[in-house]
Every structure is written in C-alpha cells, then in structure tokens.
Image (tube, rainbow, N blue to C red):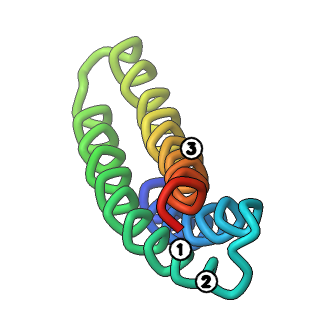
Amino acid sequence: MNWADLSFVVTPLISALAAGTGAAQEQMGWASLLFAVGGFAIGYGCGILARRLGMLLLFVGCKQPRAVLTFGLLLAYMLVPMAVMIGSFAGCAWLAAWIARRFV
C-alpha cells in the first residue's frame, strides 16, 4: 500500500470521527452519529481526490528524467494528499459544529 492508497483509507475514517466529535462538542448527544455518517461521506469524496492527486504526482514524478524534478514531484506526492486529508478533517469538524450550533 502506498501513501496515496493510505490517504484514501484513512480520510473517511478520521473525517467521520472529526464530524462526530465536532457535533458532540455542541452537546448533540446520540445525534452526533448522524454527523459522523455525513463526515464519512465527505471524507470518502476527499479520499478519492487525495488518492487521484497522489497517484498523478507519483506517476508523473517517476517519469521525469531529472532528479530535481523527480524530487520536487515526489515531495508534492507526500504533501498534497496530507493537505487534502487535513483539510477534510478540519472541514468536517467545523461544518458539523456549525450545523449543530445553527440549525439543531
């Protein structure tokens, strides 16, 4: 399993946890499980995005003739899926807390 595949597996699980935690902090109780399901769906979409971007950077980076270009693209391969994952986690937690605070 490479880094892009790992980001695809980890993102939905942690996004669900982040969304459930964000709703639980707003005193949602058992309804925070519904937010966790929504966070899983958002995380699944972000996981697909992170995997596709990571694989694209990996394949393009491996075909470069110069080592400097390869290093830069492989560094991006490590950082871009991580940025998508962190954005998904933070976004799910913030969105769940905002919805719980405003609408419920």
Disc sitting over residue 86 in the figure: 3
- Label 1's element? helix
Q: CA distance from mark 1 to mark 2?
A: 7 Å
Q: Which residue is mark 1?
A: 35
Q: Is residue 32 above or below residue 86?
A: below
How far across and how far down the image is residue 27, in percent?
76, 69
* Numbered disc in front, either 1 or 3: 1
Q: Is residue 51 left or right of residue 63?
A: right
User: Which element is circle 2 on?
Assistant: helix
Q: Is residue 24 above or below residue 94?
A: below
Residue that label 2 marks = 31
Residue type (three-letter) at the residue carrying disc 1 = Phe
Residue 5 appears in which quarter of the rendering?
A: bottom left
Q: Is there CB contact under 8 Å for labels 2 and 3?
A: no
x, y percent for residue 92 = 52, 55
Tag 3's secondary structure?
helix
